[in-house]
Image (spheres, rainbow, N blue to C red):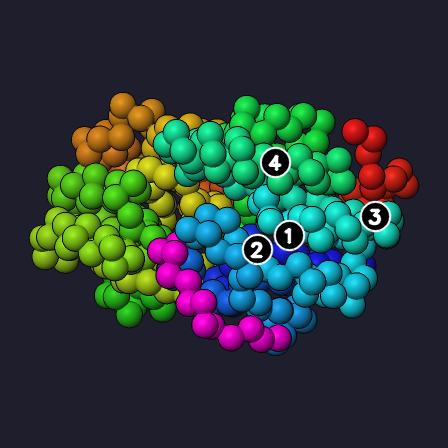
Amino acid sequence: MRIVMLCDLYDDSQLYRENLLAKYYSKHGHQVTVVASTFTSVLDYVADRYNKSGPGRKYNDGQVKVIKLPYSLNLMNKLRKFDGVRIGEILNEEEPGVIYLHDIHLNIREAVNYIKKNPQTRIIMGYHADYSNSARNWISLNILHKLIRKSILQKGIRYIQKIYPITPASIVFLRDVYGVPLSKIELLPLGSDTDTAKKVIQAKEGLLIRKTISIPEDHIVIFTGGKLMPVKKTHILINAFNTISNPNLHLMIVGDTDKKDNNYKSQLLNLCNENERIHFVGWVEGKEIYKYMNACDLAVFPSSQSVLWQQAISMGLPLIVGQTGVQDPSYLNLHGNIIILEEKNVKADVIAKRICELAETPDLLNSLRNAALETSDELLNYDKIISKTLEIASTQDSAIENS
């Protein structure tokens, strides 16, 4: 099958949903074309550092065809779209059986125009927004979402076969803000590159990481990291770790801040206070993150969900996570592999106590490892995720629903 994906970011060095969907579609013999913006770095994308003079280009990322296009509209880094004529040309050239929209893409009009002429094609959409990461003020909620984006979605909703939010909170957002009927929605969590995870585990690549950082094989290592923004509350974890005197316990921080959060990075480094058992690794690219996770025994994320949670689970790491705001991680806790802290308990003393309980109870730690791997196979395996997204393509009913 031919699949065209429309998205804003496609960073070859990362393993985000866009990359992994494309990789696993290709693995199963599908021909994939990704249309994305000229952003080349996730850090630039998150910080809204768009270079409008960045050139468009075509290239192959493995078996995936990638077409990078400049935006024809980029209004306050909130409303972005590609030239409609060019998108129409690409769709006509690729002749897709499935068009995958990443979030409410402003080029939905071109996708709809295409399936009006080719009703055998299906449009599906992934969705990431919820009240924790979007609609944080009146203008955002009522103008950007309820007025502008909602009007865009309404014009195409009858042509979209299924919307796949990544968290239960996103389901609530789609229902409350956009009025999307539940019959159109199916939860499809972010997965992990389980093929890579299994290879790293089998090869025990974390041993080399430990050797490089001078961590003995029998010591226990805690993983945390990602884009180190204040909302992730990494400082609370460091404060917790600093209260633990166990010489056989280490904390590995794999990630970095953006330039605008340099003051927060300084705060974190100061909190490390020359503690030799805290290892501030910095940013690593793509698959390398799995090697660092393989060097660890558990992961702690005090706040704010990220794809690292899924990656850690796929590496067999038990999680200690904070349930903050509307982001309830229970949907990732299929086999009791996550210790969930209520928001009021995201405190240094509570986190320290939980870490010590796991570190001092090998049988419990091992049980949670096995539970994490079970959850990974059932929920986070992209072989199963892409199969779910393509079920809709095999239906015989019309792609255009009656309004």
**Circle 3: residue type:** Lys
* Magenta segment boundaries in residue numbering: 46-58
Residues at discs 4 and 2 in contact (Cβ within 8 Å): no
Picture layout, residue 234 above or below residue 182? below
The foreground one among 84 and 44 is: 84
Q: Which of marks 1 and 2 is nearer the N terminus?
A: 2
Q: Residues within 10 Å of mark 1 (few under 14, many from 20)?
A: some
Q: What residue type is labelled 1?
A: Asn
The C terminus lies in quadrant: top right
Amino acid type of the residue tagged 2 in the rendering: Lys
Kind of element beneath mark 2: strand
Mark 4 nearby-residue class (10 Å; few <14, some 14–19, many ≥20):
few
Place of residue 94 in the rendered image (x, y in percent of width and height, measured from the top left):
77, 65
Q: Is residue 52 within the magenta segment? A: yes
Q: How far apart are marks 1 and 3 (CA)?
A: 15 Å
Residue 311 coordinates in the image, percent (x, y) = 47, 50
Q: Name the residue under label 2.
A: 81
Residue under circle 4? 151
Q: Mark 1 points at which residue?
A: 107
Q: Where is mark 3, residue-wise?
A: 116
**Are the residues at dot 1 and dot 3 in contact (C-beta closer than 8 Å)?**
no
Callout 1 touching callout 2 (CB < 8 Å): yes
